[in-house]
Image (cartoon, rainbow, N blue to C red):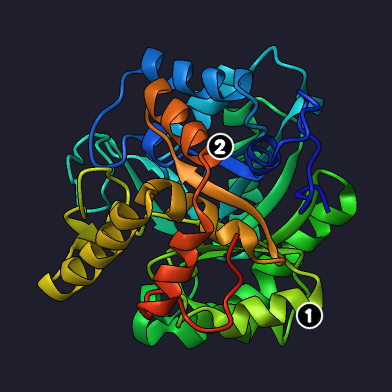
Amino acid sequence: MPVQHHDQDPSGKPDAGTARLASLAFGGAPAGNLYTGVNDADARDAIGHAWREGIRHFDTAPYYGYGLSETRIGDALAGIDRATYTLSTKAGRLIDVDQDRHDRSDGFAVDGRRAYFDYTRDGVLRSFESSLRRLRTGRIDLLLLHDIGELTHGPRHPQVLAQALNEALPAMAELRDQGVVGAIGLGVNEEAVCLEVMQRFPLDAIMLAGRYTLFEQSHSRAVMTKAQADGVSVLIAGPYNSGLLGSDAGPGDNYDYAPAPPAIKARAQQFYDVCARTGASVGAAALQFPMAHPAVAKVVCGLRSSAEVDSAIERIRERVPAATWTALAEAGLIEAGVPVP
């Protein structure tokens, strides 16, 4: 399994902050112009800066900017020893040129391209070959089947699940057997589909976005327990819940990729109140919290600029007092029995 739970940091320093840095991964959605545009130079600088500062795993997907994120990561890492970093990308969508398209409903500030679902065997193989070209590499360390589940596909979920089990995942397993993929899994943001697939197809890893976070654990406990029991590595994405706990100033305006309802913002404010009272930053607590779970291999944080890279690394290395975790648990903001750092 190329995405290990206990990575070696190249600095060799034994402090806890360095150990946590080994578990921090670069999330590539912002490099695909998520919500707002980023120019090529700034995106490449952020990716290169992350590598120079010790981040060693980079996650992306064809969907992120309709190929733009993969292209920028490939360009930024070109010339760097491939053995010094790992890559994850995804399959399940194909990208087309559509010169007349100026739609922002997917969240990406990119014109002239579109993405469409394709979970067929041929679609997975075509997606994989396109990813290799854009990433300028001959192998992918972790290939994830992207966005299956009822939350995404609604009434088509049974059909999509059957195609995933019968075509997409077997094709990915063949790529793993050929040695061009190191490990395979799912990249989703709902627990139910993980449990459905884990009962029927052997996975190496799961990337779960927004469900096992400082803000919420109730919709991930079963999958986290099963992953630990089965030896499936978990990569936690969306640790700030779409920015809800991402700012030092107070709760963000979004939750789960949509405007946060008043009740959600009010609950988020409680995290800020506890952290202020106990001398911690919410961002540091949110980034460090998932790393305490023994099933978690990486925490994937979307990073848009070199400054955001520096902020994430600072948060990873920051000491969060034990009193903070105790106070959050006593306030009922962390569920009973959930491991904390």
Viewport quadrant of the N terminus: bottom right
Instruction: Name the residue type under label 1.
Output: Ala
Q: Which label was assigned to residue 229?
A: 1
100 left or right of 134 in image: left
Mark in the foreground, 1 or 2: 2
Q: Percent position (x, y) of residue 265?
A: 18, 66
Quadrant of residue 130 in the image?
top right
The residue located at (63%, 61%) in the rendering is 292
Front residue of 78/294: it is 294
Q: Percent position (x, y) of residue 223?
A: 61, 80
Farthest residue in the left direction?
262
Instruction: Name the residue type under label 2.
Output: Arg
The residue located at (50%, 71%) in the rendering is 148
Front residue of 28/281: it is 281
Viewport quadrant of the C terminus: bottom right
Q: Percent position (x, y) of residue 105?
A: 20, 53
34 left or right of 74 in image: left
Q: Which residue is mark 2?
A: 317
